[in-house]
Image (cartoon, rainbow, N blue to C red):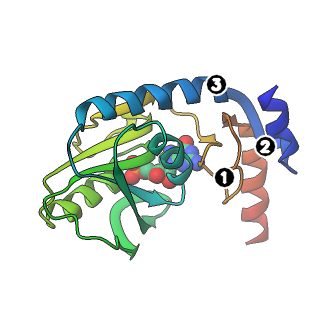
Amino acid sequence: MQEDKDKNKLTQNEILGNVLFPSWEINKKVAELGKKITDDYKGKDLLLVSVLRGGVIFLSDLARKIDLPLSLDFMSISTYDVAGEDTGVVRITKDLEQSIEGREIIIVEDIIDTGLTISYLMRNLKSRFPGSIAICTLLDRDIRRIAEIEVKYSGFKIGEKYIVGYGLDYKQRFRNLDSIYELNIDTVKKDIESLKANS
Ligand code: 5GP
């Protein structure tokens, strides 16, 4: 089974909890999203923009399910947290390498949570006069949404639990898992306690 293979890629198996989305379900959803985008963007100059690093696994699968000529570009950002809370203040650490003026842009994200990061990005990219700009996210935690954003393509709606795999990390690990997992919260709590004790 794919999940067994995923566990072989780990050295910290105990951190992974239940499988939330097995790889076959993710692949099916990515194909559906690719088909919708193909139908909507026929004859357009499409540019997919991904935010490093979490979005790249989804982007590389999605791009191959879009049956149109398209380009790819990447941005990297860092967010400022205050006391563990996301402030929505974002700094671009790597910008796009192409002009987006007059072009049809889709921002491809792994997950949208509060929406603060993507709403900053939208404002920034809109100021560069694209033809249009839309959002595609694989995972949509809309119950925690703070920023008002329109998500045109959304894969799975999810609840509160922190998840890893398929691009999503915990302390920069687990991005290479084919399926998406919940974290084993007891192990994570222990991890946080030992970090506090050592700080
Ligand atoms: P937002 O600005 O929408 O609150 O934050 C989105 C970013 O938070 C994502 O791009 C991702 O880096 C991170 N994030 C939010 N929820 C999760 C989660 O459950 N797992 C992981 N690994 N990252 C998350």
The correct choice, above or below, for 76 with respect to 24 in the image is below
Residue 24's mark?
3
Circle count? 3
Question: What residue does disc 2 label?
Answer: 15
Q: Residue at x 48, y 48 (%)?
A: 59
* Quarter of the image with the C terminus in it: bottom right
The correct choice, above or below, for 142 with respect to 167 in the image is above
Relative to 88, is 109 on the left or the right? Answer: right
Amino acid on which the number 3 mark rests in the picture = Trp
Sequence-wise, the earlier of marks 1 and 3 is 3
Disc 1 Cβ-to-ligand 1 distance below 8 Å = yes
The correct choice, above or below, for 20 with respect to 94 in the image is above
Sequence-wise, the earlier of marks 3 and 2 is 2
Report, in whole angstroms, how far the alpha carbon at label 3 lies from the one at label 2: 22 Å
* Quarter of the image with the N terminus in it: top right
Report, in whole angstroms, how far the alpha carbon at label 2 lies from the one at label 1: 9 Å
Residue 143 visible in the current orientation: no
Give the structural element (helix, strand or loop) at label 3.
helix
Task: Residue 91 in the image: state x and y as whole percent.
Answer: 36, 73
Give the structural element (helix, strand or loop) at label 1.
loop
Q: Residues within 10 Å of mark 2 (few under 14, many from 20)?
A: some
Question: What residue does disc 1 label?
Answer: 170
Q: Which residue is drawn at 66% across and 60% down?
A: 172
Q: Residues within 10 Å of mark 3 (few under 14, many from 20)?
A: few
